[in-house]
């Protein structure tokens, strides 16, 4: 047993002496975990910028913009909402004519442009038809939140105009005196009813999603990047180490030493398995920093980590006897790592993929590991919830180690 530990320690010292290995073990996983976690988290609901060219400056135009803000608080209306921090991204010398503002929408500096033409207020007061030019980067097919908000505001405004005309027409039909005060009173009453509609929908978001998904994007990126980089760190280290020692004659010399071959193989397995566990620790420490909830069953988490790392180690041992040089190993490790990550759900949740892709993905150990992590991270699962993934991973481990040890060559 002492020889086994000595061999394992020697393998680890050789691996850690290479700065490139340290970069792949620490720096890259941390960077990608933080990047993908931020992307999937989304940082909350952002604001949508709408440029407004108000050529009328009437009370009706001001009311239109006020209602637009009330209906959709996520809108940033520019230049009206401009601040000293230049949140509207406007150049002080920039001409705010219609052509320049349309160009801003095309360039992506703004999400939409609304033009309120001169005479808008007078036309609304006279119940005359008026068109509001509107430019947007969104398509009608995919939906435009700004347009939807604007249509809701205009529906209210048009309803007020219709109510005023109906009230005036009714008063005239009854030979009642129609005065400006009466018309204004009808309009104000219509506005009050629009502000307090008799029938509304009460929207309540259930707490189940928040309770089951407290981790946001980092609940996906932390286990995803850990499983992804274990493939690179373990398979790369194991296969390169074994092939390099075999080609340089190190393994043949070890075979004639007074050390059992089982100890030699076991020491190497322990070393590469340890690298995989260290990889998990590094990425999961990032998860601790960003506040990831690792679930309620630490035993289940450890069992899943150990099972997956053993499976990847076994896969490396099964492939190593068929490798000839380092270039071949790097190409195969990159190919397997990328394919397993894409199909297994390391980069994005596997649940968003079509059913046939999910089935193909479960031909990889990474998909089974991510199934287990999802149960623990998102649904507060326990050991019984990860028994299937763990069972599959351990079964694959036995088969792969059997193949690898059977074909293991010392020369």
Image: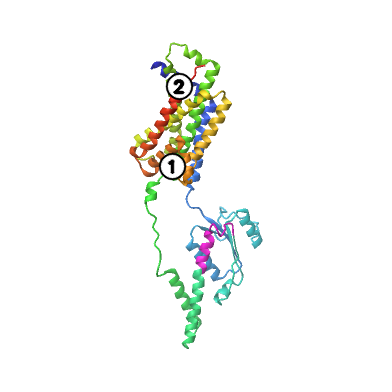
Residue sitting at x 51%, y 41%: 35
Residue 307 horizontal side relative to residue 66, left or right: left
Residue 112 horizontal side relative to residue 365, left or right: right
Which corner quadrant holds the N terminus? top left
Please state the horizontal and vertical placement of residue 322, each as a whole percent of the image: 53, 24
Please state the horizontal and vertical placement of residue 370, each as a whole percent of the image: 43, 39
Residue to which mark 1 is pinned: 219
State how far apart marks 1 and 2 are (Cα). Answer: 39 Å
Please state the horizontal and vertical placement of residue 108, each as a whole percent of the image: 60, 53
Residue 149 is covered by the magenta coloring: yes
Residue sitting at x 47%, y 80%: 167
Q: Is residue 116 above or below residue 268?
A: below
Q: Which residues are magenta?
A: 136-154
Residue to which mark 2 is pinned: 406
Q: Secondary structure at mark 1?
A: helix
The numbered mark, 1 or 2, whose residue comes first in the sequence reads: 1
Please state the horizontal and vertical placement of residue 240, each as a whole percent of the image: 53, 24
- The reply to whether residue 230 is in sight is yes
């Amino acid at each position: 047993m002492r020889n086994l530990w000595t061999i394992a320690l020697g393998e680890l010292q050789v691996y850690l002496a290479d700065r490139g290995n340290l970069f792949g073990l620490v720096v890259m996983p941390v960077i990608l975990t933080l990047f993908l976690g931020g992307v999937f988290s989304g940082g909350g609901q952002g604001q949508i910028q709408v440029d407004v060219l108000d050529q009328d400056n009437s009370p009706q135009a001001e009311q239109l913009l006020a209602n637009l803000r009330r209906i959709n608080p996520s809108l940033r209306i520019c230049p009206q909402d401009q601040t000293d921090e230049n949140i509207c991204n406007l150049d002080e010398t920039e001409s705010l004519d219609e052509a320049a503002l349309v160009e801003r929408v095309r360039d992506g500096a703004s999400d939409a442009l609304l033009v309120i033409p001169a005479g808008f207020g007078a036309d609304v007061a006279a119940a005359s038809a008026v068109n509001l030019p509107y430019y947007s980067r969104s398509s009608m097919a995919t939906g435009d939140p700004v347009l939807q908000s604007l249509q809701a505001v205009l529906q209210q405004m048009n309803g007020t105009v219709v109510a005023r005309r109906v009230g005036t027409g009714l008063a005239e039909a009854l030979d009642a005196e129609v005065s400006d005060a009466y018309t204004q009173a009808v309009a104000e009453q219509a506005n009050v009813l629009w502000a307090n509609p008799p029938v509304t929908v009460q929207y309540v978001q259930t707490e189940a999603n928040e309770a089951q998904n407290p981790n946001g994007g980092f609940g996906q990126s932390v286990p995803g990047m850990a499983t992804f980089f274990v493939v690179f760190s373990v398979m790369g280290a194991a296969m390169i180490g074994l092939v390099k020692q075999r080609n340089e004659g190190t393994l043949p010399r070890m075979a004639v030493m007074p050390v059992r071959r089982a100890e030699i193989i076991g020491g190497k397995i322990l070393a590469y398995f340890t690298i995989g566990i260290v990889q998990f620790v590094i990425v999961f420490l990032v998860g601790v920093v960003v506040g990831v909830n690792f679930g309620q069953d630490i035993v289940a988490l450890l069992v899943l980590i150990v099972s997956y790392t053993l499976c990847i180690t076994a896969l490396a041992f099964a492939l190593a006897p068929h490798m000839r040089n380092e270039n071949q190993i790097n190409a195969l490790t990159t190919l397997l790592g990328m394919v397993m990550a894409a199909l297994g759900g390391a980069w994005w949740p596997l649940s968003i993929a079509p059913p046939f892709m999910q089935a193909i993905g479960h031909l990889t150990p990474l998909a089974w590991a991510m199934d287990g992590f999802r149960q623990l991270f998102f649904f507060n699962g326990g050991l019984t919830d990860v028994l299937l993934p763990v069972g599959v991973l351990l079964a694959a481990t036995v088969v792969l180690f059997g193949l690898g040890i059977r074909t293991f060559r010392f020369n």
